[in-house]
Amino acid sequence: MSWLDEVRWDAQGLVPVVAQERDSGDVLMVAWMNREALAKTAELGRAVYWSRSRGRLWFKGEESGHVQQVHEIRLDCDGDVVLLKVTQLGHEPGIACHTGRHSCFFQRLDAAAGHWEAVEPVLKDPEAIYR
Amino acid sequence: MSWLDEVRWDAQGLVPVVAQERDSGDVLMVAWMNREALAKTAELGRAVYWSRSRGRLWFKGEESGHVQQVHEIRLDCDGDVVLLKVTQLGHEPGIACHTGRHSCFFQRLDAAAGHWEAVEPVLKDPEAIYR
């Protein structure tokens, strides 16, 4: 599939992927894909990442049930970053983060105080997500 | 500044950074920062990246005038991706991409046809941006 050749894979054969919730516009997470993960994502219409820690394909939601339905796949100008427009399934409101939060970007810099502050609530106890 | 130590810099001392337009929610671009770039971004309230191709700090907008005013800096659960909430200055509507488009993510996958398609207009001729 030639469209896969237009992605500029890095030295590890990976590309960073931003998952954005289509309806809210919220940036949910950034993960990585290899060629097979991106092909599977396009084929299945659900997000399939490459888990760098586990060294295998990661069908998002395979354990948590928090599957990401993929509406659009975009590539940036340099061909080295992918953007997914998704619906975060499995919980209402959607939980993308393994901490049980809506978005992985829940830490906001308080520059005056010089620290990161968690500003998003835990929607579901991670122990109840990963049993 | 200890908050900088909480970022999980990669082997090159870099972290990927997503720039999201605060008011529209649009994902504008993904670039990279080193420690100095992130410190400068927090200090100045404007996006300062690390240009991997030029090997130096890149004050976004230094040539184009398309400066990004930074409202919020967020860090993800693993500490290895940063999200900026920005206002894209210098043109109305904002131009973040060096191709003269609003967003760098202007190529959409047409999975049936098997190719990427440019689906966002060029708002300003790049030759008029970079003189």
Image (cartoon, coloured by chain):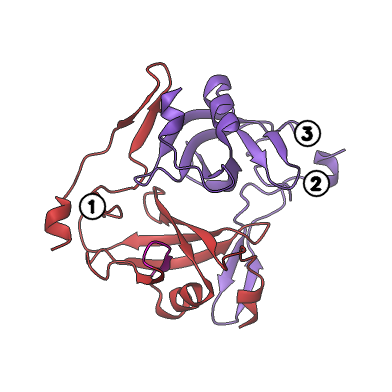
Chain colours: A red, B purple
Q: Chain of mark 2?
A: B
Q: CA distance from mark 1 to mark 3?
A: 42 Å
Q: CA distance from mark 2 to mark 3?
A: 11 Å
Q: Which amino acid lies under the numbered mark 2 shown in the image of this protein?
A: Pro
Q: Is residue B3 in sight in this rendering? A: yes
Q: Which amino acid lies under the numbered mark 1 shown in the image of this protein?
A: Pro
Query: Label 2 neighbourhood size at 10 Å, few (<14), some (14-19), many (20+)?
Result: some
Q: Secondary structure at mark 2?
A: helix
Query: Label 1 neighbourhood size at 10 Å, few (<14), some (14-19), many (20+)?
Result: few
Identify the residue at horizontal 63%, vertical 39% (top origin): B94
Q: Which amino acid lies under the numbered mark 3 shown in the image of this protein?
A: Glu
Residue B63 disc label = 3
Q: Chain of mark 3?
A: B
A52 inside magenta stretch: yes
Range covered by the magenta-colored residues? A47-54
Q: Residue furthest right?
A: B131
B96 inside magenta stretch: no
Q: Position of residue A99 (x, y in %)?
A: 24, 49
Query: Label 3 neighbourhood size at 10 Å, few (<14), some (14-19), many (20+)?
Result: few
Q: Position of residue B108 (x, y in %)?
A: 58, 66
Q: Quadrant of the C terminus of chain B?
A: top right
| Residue denoted by label 1 | A93
Q: Position of residue B4 (x, y in %)?
A: 46, 30
Depth order, front residue of A68/A109: A109
Mark 1 and mark 2 in contact? Answer it, CB < 8 Å. no
Taking A109 as reference, is B46 left or right?
right
Q: Is residue A112 above or below residue B118?
A: above
Q: Chain of mark 1?
A: A
| Residue denoted by label 2 | B126
Identify the residue at horizontal 34%, vertical 47% (top origin): A104
Mark 1 and mark 3 in contact? Answer it, CB < 8 Å. no
- Of discs 1 and 3, which sits in the foreground? 3
